[in-house]
Image (tube, rainbow, N blue to C red):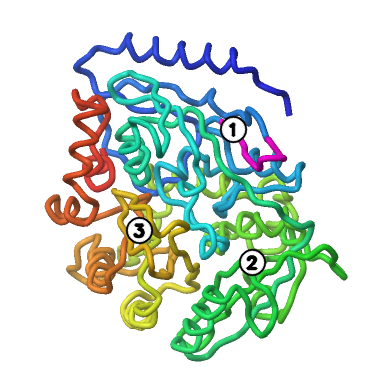
Amino acid sequence: MTAVSTADYQARVAKLVDALTTIAPNAPVRLGKRTSNLFRSRAPIAAPALDVSDFQNVLHVDPENRIAEVEGMVTYERLVAATLAHGLMPMVVPQLKTITLGGAVAGMGIESSSFRNGMPHESVLEMDVLTGDGRVLVVRPDNEHRELFFGFPNSYGTLGYALRLRIALEPVKPYVWLRHVRHHDPSAFFADLATACQQGSFDGEPVDFVDGTVFGPDEMYLTLATYSDHAPYTSDYTWMSIYYRSIQHRVEDYLTIHDYLWRWDTDWFWCSRAFGAQRRWVRRLAGRRLLRSDVYWKIAAFERRFGPMRRIDQLRGKPPHEEIVQDVEVPVDNATKFLDFFHAEIPISPVWVCPLRQRDASVKWQLYPMRADTLYVNFGFWSSVELSPGAADGSHNRRIEHTVEELDGRKSLYSTSYYGEDEFWRLYNGAVYDNLKQRYDPDGRLLDLYAKCVRRR
């Protein structure tokens, strides 16, 4: 990977700031980039795009101090390649290769190390942030911009954009040993999940990663993964074999650390089945190059925009469907209640389960407040369900939002949301957000969080 000098980075920053000054002061500004992992459509508005796509480099990896310095648009695929070369990885690596570090910090990221390390923003040491008012600020937890540091996660580019980040890394081993422990009862499933997270071990074996897959009310698998220096074999889920199907048939498995981190990407968890990509002949034709989450995302984005399959279904007389693409977190003590509700009212399967807790209980992340002393369970579900006659689009999503709030949970904002404005700001700390907006984007050149995440501007 070609090194990028500090001078080169600074030159690109100056060019970006100059581009911002050429946009009329009263004009709203969008951040322009070539990739996205958001799942909410946008209403068309005339707004200039500030191109940040050049900021996609790994600037430096310091193996001695376990720190990486990277640009905001670097994908985790590139970042992981750079850090694994030194026997290190980011403390949390979201599941999909083209998620960017800046996106995971401004939004919410999670993976199976989150019960130890929280979310990606919790390992950030410092950022250069281009704010809405055109400044480029060094933002740290101990300087004059500490309020922006702790308010940046869950701001989704509405306060500014992270151009450069310094993040902490952790050491890895070459292989990962996986155990898939089947459960028939949700209460026992979540009890074992909590025990593994609290003790860092299960059945006498250390545990470095924890997640789970729910195939039905009586078929749940807790996947416990452990670093290993050696492996008697390694499985390959990058082409013909499908990782999530292996969970139902294997008690244990071994993967390289690289393949473990990207185990979900080949089939976009299980969403590749919607495109016929789990058929063997399709996989043979597609090859490894096309069996990737970003390929599926482009197909899904085309469908959301133009709706060819939706029109075909209408011509065939099929009932309308509501898209439900969500990640929510509820305290582990309420996880069984949420899963019972979900199985009763939302006919989607499988469901991904991932535990998380805050890495440092003394910190408050202002725009995504969670109880610092609590283990949460993330539920990820990505599909569509049939609408009942007369039911409004969004009715299922709205029931999910209500239930999550009743169970003292939170919902990630990367997809569609249906909150009323007062409700939204109550849940996502509107008073703090308003103060940050006034300080760092007083003219409102960037969209506000409600307009972007609910009104889908």
- Please give the range of residues in magenta: 62-70
Q: Residue 102, percent across and down? A: 47, 37
User: According to the image, label 2 marks what residue?
Assistant: 208
**Image quarter (top left, top right, bottom left or bottom right) of the C terminus:** top left
The magenta stretch spans residue 65: yes
Q: Amino acid at mark 1?
A: Glu
Q: Is residue 27 visible?
A: yes
Q: Give the residue at x 44% y 56%.
A: 360
Question: Whole-Å distance between the Cαs marked 2 and 1?
Answer: 25 Å
Q: Residue 226, percent across and down? A: 70, 68
User: According to the image, label 3 marks what residue?
Assistant: 315
Name the foreground residue: 311 vs 338: 338
Tag 2 and tag 1, C-beta contact below 8 Å: no
Name which quarter of the figure residue 85 lies in: top right
Q: Secondary structure at mark 2?
A: loop
Q: Residue 361, percent across and down? A: 40, 60
| Mark nearer the N terminus (2 vs 1) | 1
Q: Give the residue at x 30% y 63%.
A: 320
Q: Which-is-in-front pick, marks 2 and 3?
A: 2
| Mark nearer the N terminus (2 vs 3) | 2
| Mark nearer the N terminus (3 vs 1) | 1
The magenta stretch spans residue 288: no
Q: Secondary structure at mark 3?
A: helix
Q: Amino acid at mark 2?
A: Asp
Task: Return the residue found at the far left.
Answer: 422
Name the foreground residue: 306 vs 70: 70
Question: Whole-Å distance between the Cαs marked 2 and 3?
Answer: 50 Å
User: According to the image, label 1 marks what residue?
Assistant: 69
Q: Secondary structure at mark 1?
A: strand
Q: Give the residue at x 73% y 57%.
A: 257
Q: Give the residue at x 19% y 53%.
A: 424
